[in-house]
Image (cartoon, rainbow, N blue to C red):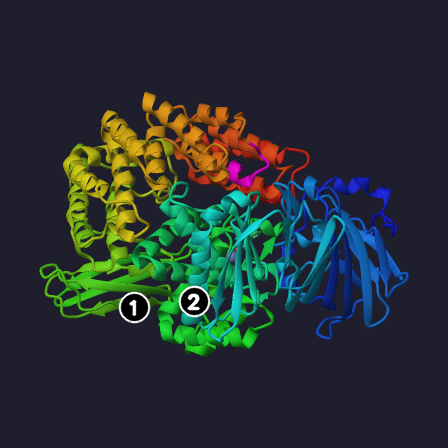
Amino acid sequence: MDIARTPATPDGNPEMADAAVEPKAPPEIRREDYAPFPWLVPTIRMEFDLGLEKTRVRTTMDVERNPAADASPTIRLNGDGLQPVSLTCDGGDCAGHMMDGDDLVITLEGDRHTIEIVTEIDPSGNSQLMGLYASGGMLCTQCEAEGFRRIAFFPDRPDVLSTYTVRMSGPKAQFPVLLCNGNRTGEGEGGDTHWAEWHDPWPKPSYLFALVAGDLVARTDSFTTMGGREVELNVWVREGDLDRTEHAMESLKRSMKWDEEIFGREYDLDLFNIVAVSDFNMGAMENKGLNIFNTKYVLADPDTATDGDYDGIEGVIGHEYFHNWSGNRITCRDWFQLSLKEGFTVLRDQLFSADMGSAPVKRIEDVRVLRGVQFPEDSGPLAHPIRPDSYREISNFYTSTVYNKGAEVIRMMRSMAGEELFRKGTDLYFDRHDGEAATCEDFVKAIEDGTGLDLVRFRRWYAQAGTPKVVLKLEHEGETAKIRLAQTVPATPGQPVKEPMPIPLKLALFDRSTGKHGGEELVVLGEESAEFAFDGFAEKPVLSINRTFSAPVSIERAVPREDLVFLAARDDDPFARYEAMQELMTGYLVAAVSGDLGENEREAARADIARALEAVIEDDRLDDLMRGELMMMPSHSYIAEQMLVAEPGRIHAEREALKADLGARLASPFHALYDRAAKIEFSLGAEAKGARKVKTLILGYAAASDPAKAVELAAWQYDRADNMTDRQGALMVLAGLDSVERTDKLLDFYNRYRGNALVIDKWFALQASSLHPQVIEHVKALSEHADFTLKNPNRVRSLYMAFAANPHGFHAADGEGYDLIADLILELDPINAQTAARSVPPLGRWRRIEPGRARLMREALDRIAAAPRLSRDTFEQVTRSLG
Ligand code: PHE
Ligand code: ZN
């Protein structure tokens, strides 16, 4: 035992008052220090005596020495704010025990023991929403990553797997429904209380434990697996929400079927429960047999949910369901391996959504998230490899890098192997590691063995942070087209020098006159640089590169604008077409912001962009969902990412100016498209969805070019809307324009939906992300609104995260936006540290922002850093951001 702090007495102890003072620098946990736990805990029994203010937990665990680990005279049971109310070993006194910080360390002399500990917790006082907490009168848990230790003393690490038996009892009237992992094995009642006993036959780590007690109702259905198992499915919600659960249930059934067909994975219990809770730090959680969801990813009907919400629900339901194999049956050895389950599961949910809807549109959306969120992360102070080397607070590593880049890395293996061989690889992985706590290395090895690929160098993608840059040159001589590629992986915190990584690039060379290519090729840039030659081109071809975004890299090349116009109009890969449009607009905007363009060049570029966009509007081979993608302008953050040092004010101004210019030039084709789309009646099908998408995009262009007209049209769309997508789209545009209609419709929306938390979230978010000149005043006023609370993460996100992602408000030149976020972080940190820490990254971008604002951003970070008692979460994010 290392440090002996105030020893605990078995019946609770009063001497722990100073434990609340957080040390200034929490320790760094390093991947290379991993050692297996000295003890196994094959079985655990828990008894919960449930109450909102006081819940008593009796935990009985059988422990035995782990033959695969170094022997230890003690067992360390993690706790977080717990006191043992009572403690016994084998029914009597333990040989010795003490508190070491928050952990309970017990001396064990033999090879097998039974430890019983009672703890008491106050769920209603738990505003961190980790462990057992109260949400709107119900009780629920969140244990990933380290929340279980807030419920019971236990080796709270993912490589300790146990079989759980849980008995829960509580007042029947308050908690008529009692749920836990696995199957219900018994129930009963006596007087005002009742109880249920649950058994989960599948050994699991503590982070997958879950329990729910509350007044809930279920939509019930069933699914018969390929092996003939009949599974009862329930989606549990509050009484009034039942008629908004159909889409979630249908999505669940589709997920179950899809995972059987595409990955050969069958469900393994007779019951699958989903519970929706309104206070939740994340999107959802894959607890075994009892997924707990943010209401945002369950509830939908056309009047309250947008098309984006419907897609989000399908994707997240799929994601959590797919974790049953990629996460639960095979879990992570330690938290450095998080991408083992998250990267793979994101890839699985992406492929699922692609199969359920438009695959190209889904691919474009996924790349937009990657480039809008992950690329900035990878080029800033918080950059880390998909398998990090160290952390202070693991909650800070549930990042776009671990999730989205993690998915891209596995997608590259899939592209190189081909679908069929990739399936052999995943079959082998599931087969080889079922029931284990595995590593990323185990995964790569299984893919290597199953596919026959050589992934020796490819493993660097797991170890190195930073988005690789590929410089490309296309040359033409005689009949030969030559492509020269050279890669660099930029330095990132703690990683000054990088090795080249294999980069698979799909490409096609188009003949300018016929508009055709001779077939797509996959080249792998395996070294620092390489050259690829292609024969049979009398004329210099048009190169389409990184088709389908086959590698998560940025490509730097000098490409004639006419080639981009060509590709935007005819590339047969829809992603590449989108990319050409984006490149056209981004190229222009970066040059315009940098002041590199004369008036003639500006005019020529804008005319080309308008021509390309007009071709998109008029191309009748396109469906509107795809047309909408091609009509979208690159985001502010993507443009900023292309520049070494960004000037947010200028980017915003140039981007709005281009929008206005295009809106004016294309007023009449836009109008015609809007009219056509407005005639399509509401349905959830692709055609009607596409129509809604282009309508609101057109409103956005009109808002920039002809605000008065836009107000009129948006108000009209708002008034006749029979669905949330149209209504929210119209209101979003109105929110940015000063007008009577703005006030009217915002008020109408609020009154119409008051009491519906998810829709009121939209009302906050629309105003916080608006282009209105007074957006900061609006956000301040909204933070005082009766419906605003720091206790609900969805509400916090809808106001402040939306604001921090709104460059026009956040980057106000006088630093007021930065102060607003710093104030929020300081106020929220003691209430909900995880959510507070998630607002830090926008301030951490200061190195890439012009000096005036950079200084103000640093000052905001310094002010947070100087606060006396920061959580581990916020402390780590702020110190890394100051770098
Ligand atoms: N494991 C969850 C998922 O990605 C995310 C999560 C992490 C939820 C931590 C809650 C807490 O599906
Ligand atoms: Zn996940």
Mark 1 nearby-residue class (10 Å; few <14, some 14–19, many ≥20): some
In the image, 4: left or right of 124? right
Magenta range is 789-796
Q: Position of residue 236 (x, y in %)?
A: 55, 52
Q: Mark 1 — residue?
A: 522
Q: Is residue 775 above or below residue 493?
A: above
Give the residue at x 47% y 34%: 760
SS of the residue under disc 2: helix
The alpha-carbon separation of the residues under discs 2 and 1 comes to 31 Å
Q: Position of residue 801 (x, y in %)?
A: 48, 38
SS of the residue under disc 1: strand
Residue 594 visible in the picture = no
Q: Earlier in the sequence, mark 2 or mark 1?
A: 2
Can residue 713 be found in the magenta stretch?
no
On the rendered image, what quadrant is the C terminus found in? top right
Q: Is mark 2 within 8 Å of ligand 2?
A: no
In the image, 166: left or right of 773? right
Residue 23 visible in the picture = yes
Q: Position of residue 378 (x, y in %)?
A: 45, 50
Q: Mark 2 — residue?
A: 257
Quarter of the figure with residue 409: bottom left
On the rendered image, what quadrant is the N terminus found in? bottom right
550 or 259: which is nearer to us?
A: 259
Q: Nearer the viewer, mark 2 or mark 1?
A: 2
Quarter of the figure with residue 523: bottom left
Residue at the far top in the pictured view: 740
Give the amino acid type for the residue marked by disc 1 in the picture: Leu
Q: Position of residue 233 (x, y in %)?
A: 52, 61
Disc assigned to residue 717: none
Mark 2 nearby-residue class (10 Å; few <14, some 14–19, many ≥20): some
In the image, 123: left or right of 707? right
Q: Is residue 521 above or below residue 647?
A: below
